[in-house]
Amino acid sequence: MYYTRRNFLRATLGASTLLSFNPVAPNFLIRSLMAAAPRSDDRDTVLVVVQLSGGNDGLNTVVPYGDDEYAKNRPTLCLPPKDLHKIDSLTGFHPRMGAFMRLYEEGHLSIVQGVGYPNSDRSHEGAMRIWHTADPDKPSRQTGWLGRTVDSIWDPNNTNAHAVFVGPITQPFGLNAENVIIPSIRSLHDLITNEMPGHLKRQSQWKRAAELPRDDRDNPLLHFLQRCASNVYANDRRIEAVTKTATNTAEYPPFQLAESLRMVAQLIRADIGIRIFFTELGGGGIGGFDNHANQLDNHCALLHQLSESVAAFIQDLKHEKLLDQVLLMTFSEFGRTLKENGRRGTGHGAAAPIFLAGGKLKSGLIGSHPNLTDLDNGALKFHIDFRRIYATILDRWLGFKSQIILDRQFEPLDILNV
Amino acid sequence: MVVKSEKMAGHNQSRRIHPAVAEKLTDPRWAWAAYQPDDQRPWNLALAGHLYRRAAFGASWYQLQQALSDGPQRTVDRLLRPRADTAAFNSVYDGYEASTAGSIDGLRAWWLRRIIQTPHPLLEKMTLFWHSHLAANSVKVKNPRLMLQHVQLLRNLALNSFRDMLQAISRDPAVLINLQVDTNRKALPNENLAKPLMEVFTLGSGHYTEKDIREAARAFTGWFVLKGQFRYIPREHDGNVKEILGQKGNFTGDDVIRIVLEQPATARMVVHKLYRWLICETEEPDMMLITPLVESFVKDYDILKLVETMLRSNLFFSPAAYRRRIKCPVEFALGIVKALEGMVSTTQLGQDLADLGQNLYHPPTVKGWTGGQHWINTTTLVGRHNLALALLRGSGPYADKLNPWAVAKKHGYSTFTAAMQFLLDLFLQGDLDPDVYDTVLKTVEAPANISSDDPEEILRSFAHMVVTLPEFHSA
């Protein structure tokens, strides 16, 4: 079933107590109901960020098999060309990333190559901080780029949360905001009001008690809290509606990331105003992508989880006809050194590819593969500043002002079909 | 004993601004004069609840009754200067904290427990205020022992002298590490203390220039944190002349503190912020209104005196302050715990409050928690709803520590109907619009056999309903 905003409102708000006691509903409630009511079939666009913690080896992810330097520098980690999913005569996906190859062929996946920033930081903490703050020049920057984004669009008349972190680890700094509270959720239950068992009969009275007009007209806080409570009850119904539909049986592989993305898909379907989802693979901290020794098998497993989980997510959204509203972006704090280190691992590097997935991509390879003979301290040089991607997403995808969030205007990339 | 809601409730008494009062609210002399109840502005349960929400973290039924019989000023006396030996209590808790100093989660849990148990809740309320105003985040400090010292420092001076406070925190290793100013060399003055000192802690933007910051940074050269200790290294201090906020001299860091404290803008900043914390966050105070407080504060920086003036005032007990704040997550959760006279797992609570946006020991930026309406969005409101459920359900992580029915019976309300009215008085002082009040009473089904069935489970559900009402989220 194709859920439009209109269908949803009919399904969820139609029998709401809001309407059933309409005659006594105060103006602000009626107004907020009108605002939520059918304005058009357009939904807001959504960004899903997937953090790969630990520094993903871009060279063994999008493999430059056509360049002899690759095999020469990686005697044990070099992936045999015959096993790769070939993109062109130079590059191919890691053997366990068949799902990404399919997405690529379908036009639902782009690779932005050689992404980084000047004077890259090679420590996990410093580099991750930079990707989170989007401000390499200010190591003491207090807020994350997505936190600032949410602060910049805060509006007391819209009580929905605009961003959430989905996952079991500590919330990444990219979401650190000065003003707004951005929640971390581990399951959908965190977003639904639960009741004491056995006393559900009077729920409508409960909501009525929260929504009845108050005499204290001068107090803006009470109105604000009432508006938010009404919104909570409406969201409850929306989330319950999506968890009960048959489409909830979309198949996801048994990985943590896939579970998180399934939740994200459900919340996108529920359409409760969340514009930004942030999730993670690698376990946070100095994460699983940090392979200084015996990298091959571990990296293999992580890339497999990434590509299978994202592919399932894209498939789910496509089935729901929601893919055109969604853009997913991966990032990692840095790539890795070209040369392996004698322990079948790699050191901390610099530039690396990032992936974009969704329904509105100008698909393909964006930018050229970094030169393997022109290195910076053993690592690839960047040629696309990551803040250009952030700016493109903010300005052209989410419709926010990147200049306010990133402090200056970065040149956008022509990567979106919007 | 059945108490009629009409009798107990503060229906509309505290919320309607009497025309005679409305006019006087903008007159500073009247606004800051001590509140003396009269026929137009009677002392009642609603105002007692209001006082305990602002000057403490909520009240038990006993405390509310005591306040009702003591009147406002004697209750404020007790909140400001409790008879109990607060120092002895705090030294016991300092010991508990020292024993868990390796773990920030442990410190967080002990702080919450201290807030629940303390004989001097106002001191903790103000410690929390300074924890946000002079914010240091454990993730950046990376040393629980220094965080422990930091919050103890805030507590020791929370109701003391702001001058001493500023001097102490400018040498506090946690603050300096948090601001990344643990080295400040003569050759490379570090502005990371000077800037937030002027912008956030004292003057506020618009009251200093970039040059003032650069010069102040030079005055702070030679201040270091080495091995977790503050150190002054004379050869790294720039002894030359600086010009700061119009004054010239070969200033040291202490001179910078003296100079910023001489500025009325500093006093105004603190008064303003405290006004928001104790009185009202819906409207900015009129400059004329707060001028007497600013003029007094800039002379002595006596925090206790400032807090005392605010808490005793006509303005504080007026409709312009009543329910004009949104509870922070700590106030929300502990308001339930204090009312029901229980002790819950504060390890769990510390985590749950973090999920609601208030992770103690981790203020999000150097500006602390913005709070107010920012505390609330659909997901945090759901989070509060579910936390209240977890606290009240009688099983799960918080176990059976809070029991509304047992508390009602303990205070003599031993029928189902009386207990419901008691809970409304306890949590909201019965202060709801009449139709809301009536609707609330219908939210749960009476027990099938009202004389014999135990209503414990139903009253848990009822209490949960009451604490999720919009009124309970306001302070």
Image (tube, rainbow, N blue to C red):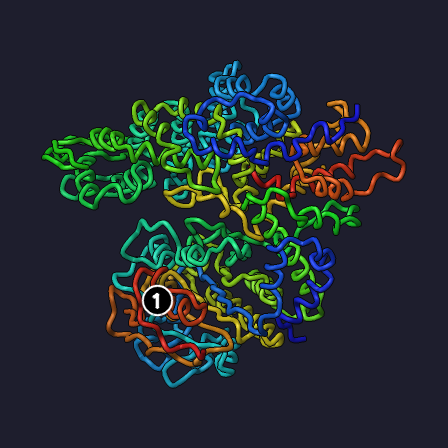
Which residue is labeled 1 in the image?
A386
Give percent across and percent down for residue A173.
Answer: 42, 53
Residue A190 shows in the view? yes
Disc 1: which chain? A
B470 relative to A282 in the view: left or right: right
Give percent across and percent down for residue B417.
Answer: 80, 33
**Label 1 packing within 10 angstroms: few (<14), some (14-19), many (20+):** many
Q: Is residue B65 above or below residue A100?
A: above
Res B259 quadrant in image:
top left
A290 relative to B240 in the view: left or right: right
Q: Is residue B334 above or below residue A51?
A: above
B75 relative to B306 in the view: left or right: right
Res B256 quadrant in image:
top left
Q: Residue at x 35, y 66 (%)?
A: A386
Task: Looking at the picture, tell me which residue is in the foreground, A322 or A319.
Answer: A322
Task: Looking at the picture, tell me which residue is in the foreground, A20 or B470.
Answer: A20
Q: Residue at x 64, y 53 (%)?
A: A26
Residue B113 shows in the view? no
Give the farthest residue toward the bottom: A89
Q: Is residue A397 above or below residue B295?
A: below
B405 relative to A362 in the view: left or right: right
Task: Looking at the picture, tell me which residue is in the foreground, B172 or B309.
Answer: B309
Q: Residue at x 67, y 38 (%)?
A: B432
Q: Residue at x 59, y 41 (%)?
A: B473
Give percent across and percent down for residue A391.
Answer: 37, 67
Task: Looking at the picture, tell me which residue is in the foreground, A145 or B137.
Answer: A145
Give percent across and percent down for residue B356.
Answer: 54, 45
User: Is label 1 in a helix, a strand or a loop?
Assistant: helix
Q: Amino acid at mark 1?
A: Phe
> What quarter of the picture does the N terminus of chain A occupy?
bottom right
